Image (spheres, coloured by chain):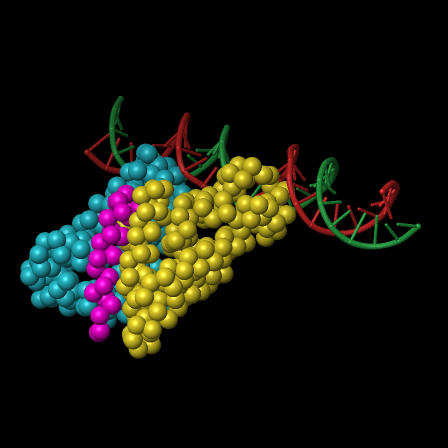
Chain colours: A yellow, B cyan, C green, D red
Amino acid sequence: MDTKSQIIYIATNLFQQKGYKGVGVSEILNACTITKGALYHHFPNGKEELLITCLESIDQAITTDIEVIFKQYQTTQEALCAMIEKLVANFEREGTISGYTFSSIVSEMASLSEPVRNTCSNLYAKIQEIYIKKLVEDGFSKDTAASIALMITASIEGAIMLCLTDNTSEPLKVISHVLPNVLKES
Amino acid sequence: MDTKSQIIYIATNLFQQKGYKGVGVSEILNACTITKGALYHHFPNGKEELLITCLESIDQAITTDIEVIFKQYQTTQEALCAMIEKLVANFEREGTISGYTFSSIVSEMASLSEPVRNTCSNLYAKIQEIYIKKLVEDGFSKDTAASIALMITASIEGAIMLCLTDNTSEPLKVISHVLPNVLKES
DNA sequence: CTCTCCATACCAACCGGTCTGTTTTTAACT
DNA sequence: AGTTAAAAACAGACCGGTTGGTATGGAGAG
């Protein structure tokens, strides 16, 4: 793997765990066993440019992953269950959700950097698009599909946060059981 | 208002907006128009002690506020609608949710500081307790009440995050319409 | 005279970022 | 194929500014 990809991969993990300000440039350098010259060669605009690149990398990872799962299962409900199960497994294995969320960055940077906020906004929109598409296939109208997709996104993100605070995978499991109620006609 | 209360009040707002690492001690000092001597007199253990005090202050504010609303309305659903409406109004007035969430601190500090993580965990538990109590009054069993309460908390927190990223109050409004579906028998 | 409360000067550590110089790879020309 | 120039990739010293935190000293109240 080339240096740039490695930087992105490692920095992404760090940012997800500790947020933007929580990770120092030198910490990234140590983790990658590179020096400042390398980092500022690939990311001349520094840390924030790296963050945005990482966010786009997360975007790729999340959306393709979700899309794969959503193609495997017939209904939205089944796909959601499988997806959350994967999140739970991920959490129980690594003690943190890596790769599926970037809430720490959102809540930290939304009020500080417009570019970052925008990138995150597009990311969430893209994820919801996948849900909406499947929901429409399930027979929902476009409007209700959009509402449900938002509800799904919100509750999963919130549940992940509760998992981190409580140090249990329970919240995600509970969400998985309650979400079907949202997938009924309104 | 005495100096200590003022520090807590102002620091709480700053922490909610920018997270823990996002706020410098000197920034707090400027906002309070005090000096380091005052801060470290009232909080000898420094910034983290101040944060935890702020979290407990948020706890007080949130729980009493929610409790007032939940006593005003008959059913959980009505109370929730009123509560979210208040959040929406707050967001549209101030451009940010102040006083009702601390997600930025959670996702940032959960993996870094056990004391902070624990404080946050207790906070969320306390909020859910209010929901659960009302839900049991509505006729739900204790187990399903707990599940629903968690779902409510998660979706609201997630919706707040989406509001911040999208810079709209729409997500909260949508949640308000979808949440009733969760309040049916499972 | 003491104790709470606070102001100020000071500190080492670290922050993100720049700069210059060196190595390594690539491309072109003979 | 061998030589060479240019460009990409990187190393590491250096910088001003800021970080959270400490130590000292003074003002005012009891």
Q: Is residue A177 magenta?
A: yes
Residue B75, horizontal then vertical, whole percent: 11, 66
Residue A69, horizontal then vertical, whole percent: 37, 59
Q: Is residue A157 magenta?
A: no
Where residue B131 sits, quadrant-wise, is bottom left
Q: Residue at x 33, y 74 (%)?
A: A136
As drawn, A138 above or below B150: below
Point out the stretch of residues depicted in magenta: A163-186
Residue A24, horizontal then vertical, whole percent: 49, 42
The answer to whether any part of residue B113 appears in the image is yes
Please identify the dominant SS of the magenta region: helix
Which quadrant holds the C terminus of chain A?
A: bottom left
The answer to whether residue A105 is left or right of residue A163 is right
Q: Residue at x 19, y 49 (%)?
A: B125
Q: Residue at x 49, y 55 (%)?
A: A57
Which quadrant holds the N terminus of chain A?
A: top right
